[in-house]
Image (cartoon, grey):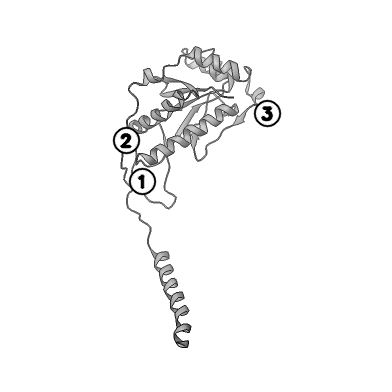
Amino acid sequence: MRYSSRILPILIVAVAAATFTFTGCKKKDMSLKLNEPRNIRGVVSYKRSFGDLNEKHLNAAQAIGIRVLSSREEAEKMKEQLQPITTNELYAVDSLTHSIPYLIPGAASLLDTIGRNFLDSLTSKGLNPNKIIVTSVLRTQNDVKRLRSRNRNASPNSAHFYGTTFDVSWKRFQKIEDEDGRPLQDVSADTLKLVLSEVLRDLRKADKCYIKYELKQGCFHITTRGK
């Protein structure tokens, strides 16, 4: 009995060590991770579901946003009212040419929510991860002048003036690669657009924002309703 009581702990340690070694040496699955799409419905009509016209966006923006800024230098001096946004784990910021990456806190929080809900939805629907891409943010009067010199249809009275509004592409998304290098099957932009539309529809129905579907610009034009 004395011998057995001594040998038992040794056997337990040996078995544990063997199990750890086996687990540690187990190779990571490096096969292509396929999408397993399910419950992807989208919306009945992009135009009808996201038909908030500029007047709605503008009224909300003027009520809760900052004053109109003439230049980017002015924006740099308003950091107590504006929050910088940069590419992170929830969304990517495009190479902005006619806007600068600042939003009021309510709009920045809404953007975080959209990015997070989109990633969660992709997981629940069996799709590999992708991030939304922000294509336009705060514009100054100088930015709009330059934009209108290239595009006469650009509005001279835009909700983008107030730090409340941003555009999210429905044409382009940023694929998130596996940390360990496992190849992931691509998800088509059309499928990602369907999932994003569901996320935005729910937030709009919850009175979190106004949304306009922009066909020519290839984006959802989004204005927060919260400070």
The residue identified by callout 1 is 184
Res 93 visible: no
Q: Which one is in front, 52 or 129?
A: 52
The quadrant in which the C terminus is found is top right
State if disc 2 and disc 3 touch (CB < 8 Å). no
The residue identified by callout 2 is 39
Q: Residues within 10 Å of mark 2 (few under 14, many from 20)?
A: few
- Identify which residue is drawn at 32% across, 52% down: 31
Residue 26: x percent and y percent? 38, 63
Of the two numbered discs 3 and 1 on the same chain, state the one appearing first in sequence. Answer: 3
Of the two numbered discs 2 and 1 on the same chain, state the one appearing first in sequence. Answer: 2
* Marker disc for residue 80: 3
The amino acid type, in three-letter code, at marker 2 is: Asn
Residue 208: x percent and y percent? 50, 25
- Identify which residue is drawn at 46% across, 32% down: 133
Count of marks, rendered view: 3
Which secondary structure, mark 1? Answer: loop
Q: In this view, does 7 lie above or below 93?
A: below
